[in-house]
């Protein structure tokens, strides 16, 4: 079991690590769903933390459909993130028809050797997620999909997430469940879906507010539940 926590600045990242997070998703623009952070933050977070840092690669919040200029920007960002020594990147690209943009992925994933690659919640705008999972599993670079199982919060889409977890077995892709998760529902959610990784944003912040700092005591509470499930998994 892994606990991933969103960080929007260096203080967030440090507090999340102190609370027991296993990994950081580093972003800016949290109210816009996450955008690529600045170079100084990327360098500082990677240099200061002992846990893996995965960096968002998303040049704007208008959509997940990218033109040639967006893709050029994203490739430059990926090269910089890799140079900084980050553990991974988080990206996604769709066609105007709302399916995985394989042409964009072919371009973006060319120089990602050594990086973990998460396909982010652009996945939740795709109607046929099982088909999309099959397409993404054809990319050896992609080892994770961040999803809430569709447009609704993850707890309301538990049956779909359970299906995705089952379908992902043997593909090399891990389902990372996020959006709408809270500490009180986490135990039952993990038990119902069988997910091995969970992703938190506002729920682990002061007052549950996306624009407040990470609350390390809340991170610790989530981590305790994750550890309980890790122990149960080891006992099976």
Image (tube, rainbow, N blue to C red):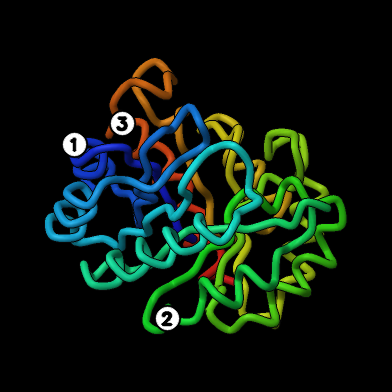
Q: How far apart are the alpha carbons under marks 3 and 1?
A: 8 Å
Residue 114 shown left or right of residue 91 in the figure: left
Outermost residue toward the top in this view: 207
Q: Say whether residue 176 is visible.
A: no
Q: What residue would you read off at disc 2?
A: 111
Q: How far apart are the alpha carbons under marks 3 and 2?
A: 32 Å
Q: What residue would you read off at disc 3?
A: 214
Q: In what element is the residue under mark 3?
A: loop
* Residues under numbered marks 3 and 1 in contact, where contact means CB atoms less than 8 Å apart: yes
Which sits in the foreground, 150 or 234? 150
Q: Is residue 180 above or below residue 130?
A: above
Residue 132 shown left or right of residue 71 in the figure: right
Front: mark 1 or 2: 2
Q: In what element is the residue under mark 2?
A: loop
* Residues under numbered marks 1 and 2 in contact, where contact means CB atoms less than 8 Å apart: no
Q: Quick one: label 3 or label 1, which is nearer the N terminus?
A: 1
Residue 51 shown left or right of residue 26 in the figure: left
Q: Quick one: label 1 or label 2, which is nearer the N terminus?
A: 1
Which quarter of the picture shows residue 43? bottom left
Q: Residue at x 42, y 24 (%)?
A: 210
Residue 175 shown left or right of residue 232 in the figure: right
Q: What residue would you read off at disc 1?
A: 11
Q: Residue at x 43, y 40 (%)?
A: 222
Q: In what element is the residue under mark 1?
A: helix
Q: Residue at x 72, y 71 (%)?
A: 168
Q: Residue at x 77, y 56 (%)?
A: 162
Task: Mark 2: give few (<14), some (14-19) or many (20+) Cα within 10 Å.
Answer: some
Q: Is residue 212 above or below residue 4?
A: above
Task: Mark 1: give few (<14), some (14-19) or many (20+) Cα within 10 Å.
Answer: few
Q: Quick one: label 3 or label 2, which is nearer the N terminus?
A: 2
């Amino acid at each position: 079991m892994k606990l991933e926590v969103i960080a929007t600045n260096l203080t967030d990242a440090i507090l999340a690590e102190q609370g027991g997070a296993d990994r950081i998703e580093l972003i800016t623009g949290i109210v816009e769903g996450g955008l690529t952070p600045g170079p100084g933050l990327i360098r500082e977070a990677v240099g200061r933390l002992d846990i893996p840092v995965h960096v968002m690669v998303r040049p704007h919040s208008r959509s997940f459909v990218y033109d040639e200029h967006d893709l050029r920007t994203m490739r430059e960002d990926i090269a910089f993130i890799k140079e900084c020594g980050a553990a991974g990147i988080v990206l996604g690209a769709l066609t105007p028809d709302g399916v995985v943009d394989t042409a964009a992925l072919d371009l973006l994933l060319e120089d990602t050797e050594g990086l973990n690659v998460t396909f982010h919640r652009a996945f939740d705008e795709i109607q046929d997620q099982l088909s999309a999972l099959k397409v993404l599993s054809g990319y050896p670079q992609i080892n994770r999909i961040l999803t809430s199982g569709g447009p609704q919060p993850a707890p309301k889409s538990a049956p779909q997430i359970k299906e995705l977890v089952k379908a992902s077995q043997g593909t090399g892709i891990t389902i990372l469940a996020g959006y709408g998760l809270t500490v009180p529902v986490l135990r039952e959610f993990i038990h119902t879906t069988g997910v091995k990784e969970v992703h938190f944003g506002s729920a682990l912040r002061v007052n549950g507010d996306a624009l407040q700092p990470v609350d390390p005591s809340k991170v610790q509470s989530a981590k305790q539940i994750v550890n309980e499930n890790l122990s149960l998994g080891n006992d099976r």
